[in-house]
Image (cartoon, rainbow, N blue to C red):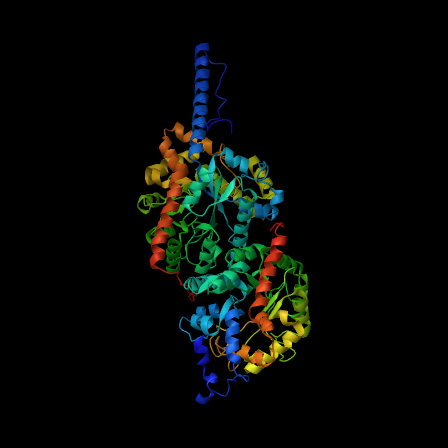
Amino acid sequence: MADLQEEPEAGPSVGAPETVPGPVLAGALERAAALLAEHPVADGCNTLVWTLRQKPYHDTDTDIPRLLRSGAVGAQFWSLLTPVTGDRVVADTLEQIDVAHELLGRYPDELLVALTAGDLADARNRGRIASFLGPVPGSTLTDSLGTLRAFHTLGVRSLAPAGAAWAQEGLTPFGHEVVREMNRLAMVVDLTACPPDAAIEITESSRAPVMISHTAAAALTRHPLNVPDEVLLAVRAAGGVCMVTFSAEQTGDSLHAVADHLDHIRSVAGPESVGLGACFGADPPHGHPAGLGDPSGYPRLIAELLDRGWPEPDLALLTWDNAARVLRDVEFTSRAAHHRKP
Amino acid sequence: MTHGPAEGGVPGQAAVPEQPSAHAARTAAQEQTAARERTAAHLAQARRLLAEHPVVDGHNDLPWALRKQVRYDLDRRDIATDQSAVLHTDIPRLRAGGVGAQFWSVYVTAELAGDAAVSATLEQVDAVNQLIDRYPGDLVRALTADDMEAARASGRIASLMGAEGGHSINNSLATLRALHQLGVRYLTLTHNDNVDWADSATDEPRHGGLTDFGREVVREMNRIGMLVDLSHVAATTMRDALETSTAPVIFSHSSARAVCDHPRNVPDDVLAQLPANGGIAMATFVPKFVLPAAVEWTAAADRNLRAHGFHPLDTGPEAMALHRAFEADRPRPVATAATVADHLDHMREVAGVDHIGIGGDFDGTAFTPAGLDDVSGYPNLLAELLARGWSNADLAKLTWSNAVRVLRDAEAVARDLSATRGPSNAVMPEPAAP
């Protein structure tokens, strides 16, 4: 962790770039680093898989050294969403899964394909990044739960209903079936980009807690991907987690702005329902706020939150515990439901 | 099915009481008794043989039948009980037939394209998984040749899967790999229609065999250990695939074209290539492919179905009622176990005894040969072959060991190839402007 202290903003004499805010309290960055060593980030969203498929040569913000060491990421959901629609979305999703396995399989010393909450603990104990596959797009399911079970067999552990015909204004009967089957299989429902009404209906109908893997507060920034407070309250009631993205568009272009969103979500959804879903892995110019341009930004953000008076237990909830709890609860629900037939 | 296979006539009707001399009549009766005893002995021998060397059947369409009949409501088709009224296949009859391994077809109709075909294939896979989970005492999932041997040793039916038609992968090699991951162990390159990269036997030639992408599909199948199935494909595609494949290929359900000239069967020059390739042709029982008279009859019957607005492959009750009405005017030529044995005799001669197998296509065909009416029929075929002088060793290869060897060899090729080659990233080229 020594190199963390050598970040430019830690040495004022070097002249830190103005856009990178330094911690106000002396030692906040050291405390953040210590905290992350204990409670690494379980991050809800990284889009590297899609990016890799677009360009074999790319300049991205995600690599293992930065994820694992600087950023102290301990778990990562690898998003398998695809902008492809229409008649190739299933095949394209299978390609995403294929590339993800190919990618994760290449670095067995650093990444561990995680299938259960137990794998989350194992990976952490062994110093590896627990890598969950998902979400896959809900539009892959038209009238078939067989496809959902195939995804599960292939290792996918989360699905985002946004954009699916069965989760538009609310849930169709088939949508309810999908949610029930996801509960049975222990797959996380990811409500990112769901219309608020559908999001609330799913949150309430799901027997397991839900996740919103990359979003921000609509109350602060109006953006189609941001969630209004009523969704936050529903997620709070369901014991889910709402993960804040590092996106200039959604949060505002500064580390402070991201911290503002975290403050807001913590106050509305509660400290037990807030998390991080940075959405690294895209190619520029997908703008991240200044200071949060790559995974090495996590310690800076935690330092900022320390400055704002977040107690350390709340920070542990934010980085790791909330996501881990959701995964555990999803599994618990699944075991309870497993007497049901497919 | 208590009678053995008939040689043209129907057993039990040969006794002619008003023969000139009592002596001759007695001789005829004795001969008939002797023939029946021989048949019974052959049948008993066949059953003993099958207990040791059960049948690996290359193709069974039970999953599609379950989808069509009851939309996978397995409660309504409990195959642990007798389903002979509605299906060719159930567990008691598989047991009676001496089946030790089954490639369950995860076929989907080529009327589905794009994602719809992929999703439907995933549903078919899901249905097979549910079947296996539902009958754990009789079926066991098998992904490798070792699994097949283990299943035989534990007295269960090794359940493998085969996809039928390149449309199931939607021009995507990653989808091909996903199917392999999900347990599918062969892909028939086409069904009755051409795909974008391969010609079918029963469609207008478009590519003249395999396209470059088609060859890449074959290479990738070799690399991951997915058997290349050449049933249904055009002869040009067969030859291209044999040229490209470094692993043994299979014909999951095709017979010999020299015996019955139908495009679904394998021409002699291709059969003759199997020894060099190491693959197998698994003879099918479908009367319209194996019996020349049935080919013509079927063409007429299909025209009749189409005229009434049915798909020729429809086996629903209305379509079958139409067939029955049609049969009243034109009796349906009936194939027998002997018809299939004629094919196997020829295939053994041309391809060799190490390169043949059995792929009944049960539940995938409206009609079946007499004596091979359903999955309990295999002993009748073996009895017929025994009567023709096939040795136990030959029959053991036919039923079990050839197919297991092919899967094992394909696994070895995949191990070799995947050590030096990563997943293929090839994509189907955009169709050129006409």
Q: Residue at x 37, y 31 (%)?
A: B392
Could you tell me if residue A325 is visible in this image? yes
Counting from the top left corner in percent of width and height, residue B314 is at 56, 46
Up-down relation of residue A262 to residue B231 (above or below): below
Q: How many marks?
A: 0
Q: Is residue A67 left or right of residue A165?
A: left
Instruction: Tell me what residue is drawn at x 49 percent, y 14 percent.
Output: B18
Picture layout, residue A274 above or below residue B62: below
Left/right of residue A7 with respect to residue A247 in the rendered view: left
- Give whichever of B52, B231 is nearer the camera: B52
Which residue is more in the foreground, B30 or A307? A307
Counting from the top left corner in percent of width and height, residue A194 is at 62, 69
Q: Position of residue B53 (x, y in %)?
A: 42, 35
Relative image position of residue A242 (x, y in whole percent): 61, 70
Residue closer to the observer: A286 or B310: A286
Q: Quadrant of the C terminus of chain B?
A: bottom left
Q: Is residue B373 above or below residue A178?
A: above
Q: Residue furthest top?
A: B22
Q: Decide if residue B284 is in sight here.
A: no
Determine whether A265 is above or below B426 in the image: below
